[in-house]
Image: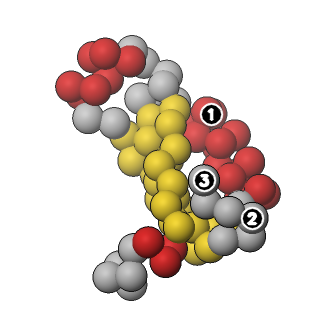
Amino acid sequence: MVGQGAKVRAQIVHGYNPEGVARLRAEVEKRLNVKWLGTTQIAPVLGAHTGPGVVGLILAREDALPSIG
């Protein structure tokens, strides 16, 4: 849990699902205090287990990552 109003850094990961990424990005930007939001495709080894179309979110409080500028 990041807490109400906390600044966060987030990464959207996906298995080639640009529509899912766009929908998740819109919700994340609307609901969270995002300082940084990146997007990347998942590694093939993970995609082999999830199948195509998966979308996920990695989230951390900004103050939990002090060494990242």
**Of labels 3 and 1, the one closer to you:** 3
Looking at the image, residue 1 sits to the left or right of residue 16; the answer is: right
x 27%, y 17%: residue: 48
Q: Give the quadrant of residue 29.
A: bottom right
The secondary structure type at the circle numbered 1 is helix
Give the crowd class for mark 3: few <14, some 14-19, many >=20 residues within 10 Å: few
Q: Position of residue 30 (x, y in %)?
A: 78, 57
Measure how far apart labels 3 and 1 are at the Cα level. 26 Å
Which mark, by number, is residue 19? 1
The residue type indicated by label 3 comes to: Met
Measure how far apart labels 2 and 1 are at the Cα level. 28 Å
Looking at the image, residue 20 sits to the left or right of residue 54; the answer is: right
Q: Is residue 47 above or below residue 27?
A: above
Compare marks 3 and 1 and give the one earlier in the sequence: 3
Q: Is residue 33 above or below residue 27?
A: below
Measure how far apart labels 2 and 3 are at the Cα level. 9 Å
Compare marks 2 and 1 and give the one earlier in the sequence: 2
The residue type indicated by label 2 comes to: Gln
* Of the pair 57 and 38, the residue shown nearer to us: 57
x 50%, y 37%: residue: 56
x 37%, y 40%: residue: 41
Q: Give the quadrant of residue 42.
A: top left
Labels 2 and 1 touching (C-beta < 8 A): no
Which mark, by number, is residue 4? 2
Which mark, by number, is residue 1? 3
The residue type indicated by label 1 comes to: Glu
